[in-house]
Image (cartoon, grey):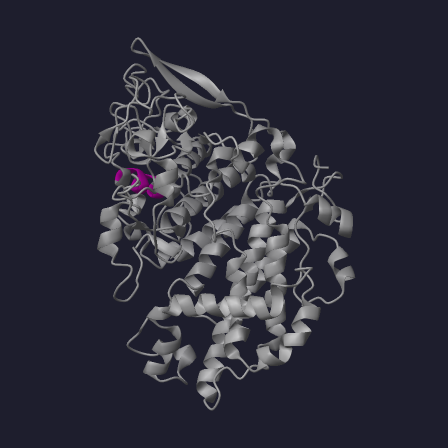
Amino acid sequence: MKHYRILLAVLIASLTAFAACDDPLNPEENFRNNLESVLMSPAKAEGIMLYGYTQMPYITPRFDDVATDDAVSNNPANTYRTMATGGWSSLSNAQDMWTQCNRGIMNLNRFFTIVDQIDWKPSNERLAKAFKSLYTGEAYALRGILKYFELRNHAGVSADGELLGIPIYNEYVTDLATFSEPRKTFTESVQSIMDDFTEALKYIPMDYGDVTSVPSAYNYLSLDEYNNIFGDQRRQKVSGRIVKAFQARVALLAASPAFNQSNTASLWETAAKYAGDLLKDIGGIAGLDPTGNVFWLPAQITAAKLRTGDNKDLPEIIWRRYMRSFRDWEQDNYPPTVYGYGRINPTQNFVDAFPMKNGYPIDDAASGYDPQNPYANRDPRLAQIVVLNGSKVRGSVINSLTGSSNDLANKMQYSTRTGYYLRKHLNENVNVQTGKQNTQDHIEPIIRYTEIFLDYAEAANEAWGPDGKGSYGFSARDVVAAIRKRAGINEDAYLATISSKEDMRKLIRNERRIELSFEGFRFWDLRRWNVALDEPAMGVELNDGVYTEVEVEDRAYKPYMVYGPIPYNEVLKFGFVQNKGWE
């Protein structure tokens, strides 16, 4: 019920205060007429703060992998396919978060102007104090998160070589001229985000959930009062742990080659610290969830009992969307034989990234890879993530390279273009056949511990080398070894051969590509690493027993597209400096 009450509060607040505003960055006129009613209603005031959640990119999951070398789409109208093939501009940007984030930020700034005026719990000063603390911390956290997404999507180098971030709006604005304030430097923008997170951590607990003793920071509350405010029903709202995870994301972004242009070692150490502190809290390597790499499987979902009891997550999950039961992903991505549209097609590039079971890359002479038996003795994650030729989906054999079924590559509009279909995320208890359709629960992660482990490994390797442990007791090599062992690479002969920072960097990036695939990372990882983006998307054909790679889709990215554009209208209206290369 808490979830629906939150959504109702958001709806009420947005309808009464902001949704009708002609200019979403200047809701003052609309708000003025409703201020009295908002001040009289804690639920409406809370809704203004909660509006920040609705402006995040998690409301609708984005499978932007089809704009990378990991996948293509068989849908000609897919916006990310359009991006990758020459349709990305400052006028048409499927990754635009500028207005959306600033809209949320401005609503949060408005919330800060009224938070002290709201009687959050009439006749009970203790509860009023607790609610004010909770919502203030939540607002700071949401503002920092929105700033992060805006920075990630729109930071870049100007024509004169300056590394720029975003405009920083920390106050509620009523004068449109204020929006012409120049973009801050990238460093200033990062600091502004971290400042918001620091403030948030002063107010909100590390975790929500019922406790048996009241934390000292809230000793003015009774146990029942604490649990009613900060208990189980608040899970999936921004907690201190989630804030710390975002601190690790921001620090890694700042340390990455596209933004750490001098390769400053201290930035890598800072990134390792933020990730390491969070991992230390779960016992380091021992805290890696043994089944965290297959979180989407029906057995995992059933075992978690996420709709009952204390609403705790899988050990792997730091933050996820609320549980939803649906069949959309299966309808979109099942092969045609099982009545799907086969939309997301993993590439041969992606398949080639999976090593052999002995850990060696397939292009290493010691791997034992047979190009005419390409799926034998491979990393088990390959078959878990990708539907290969001859694999089964819902008991049906999928022949994507041979035979005459509709699963055959390029046979029909719903067939794969690459010879592969997507398996990851799909709950195969879903039936999408007309007349027999059903829905099933899905776990939709926002932040997983595997991400934080890989953040740490990347930063620790750059700061201290493959075996440096800082003050945390585990190294980049230890993290990679644990992740690969969990995947089923039990005798990792290849890892033992790696001694240089450069070789470990390559391996960590590849592990990140596999482990976080189709979760919205690859598009941004390639850019923060400042690597070439124009690698063609490849597929495979099988003719007379011979596998042959074929080019499926050329990529039209230019080098300057490492950084995304500032929206053209914002440049035109407010004079913001555009990133180099974009018009």
Any part of residue 250 in sight: yes
Residue 96 rendering spot, x and y as whole percentages: 60, 46
Any part of residue 575 in sight: no
Q: Residue furthest top?
A: 544
Residue 362 is drawn in which quadrant?
top left
Residue 408 rendering spot, x and y as whole percentages: 34, 21
Can residue 481 be found in the magenta stretch? yes
Residue drawn where x is 28% and y is 38% of the image? 487
Residue 405 is drawn in which quadrant?
top left
Can residue 390 be found in the magenta stretch? no
Q: Quadrant of the C terminus?
A: top right
Residue 112 appears left or right of 526: right
What segment is highlighted magenta in the picture? 478-485
Q: Quadrant of the N terminus?
A: bottom left
Residue drawn where x is 25% and y is 58% of the image? 305
In the depicted structure, whether residue 323 falls above or below residue 174? above
Residue drawn where x is 41% and y is 30% of the image? 345
Residue 212 rendering spot, x and y as whole percentages: 28, 77
Q: Residue furthest bottom?
A: 123
Residue drawn where x is 50% and y is 39% of the image? 525
Compare residues 99 and 294 and report the one nearer the observer: 99
Residue 58 appears left or right of 481: right
Residue 296 appears left or right of 105: left
In the depicted structure, whether residue 81 falls above or below residue 35? above
Residue 225 rendering spot, x and y as whole percentages: 37, 82
In the depicted structure, whether residue 263 falls above or below residue 410? below
Residue 6 is drawn in which quadrant?
bottom left
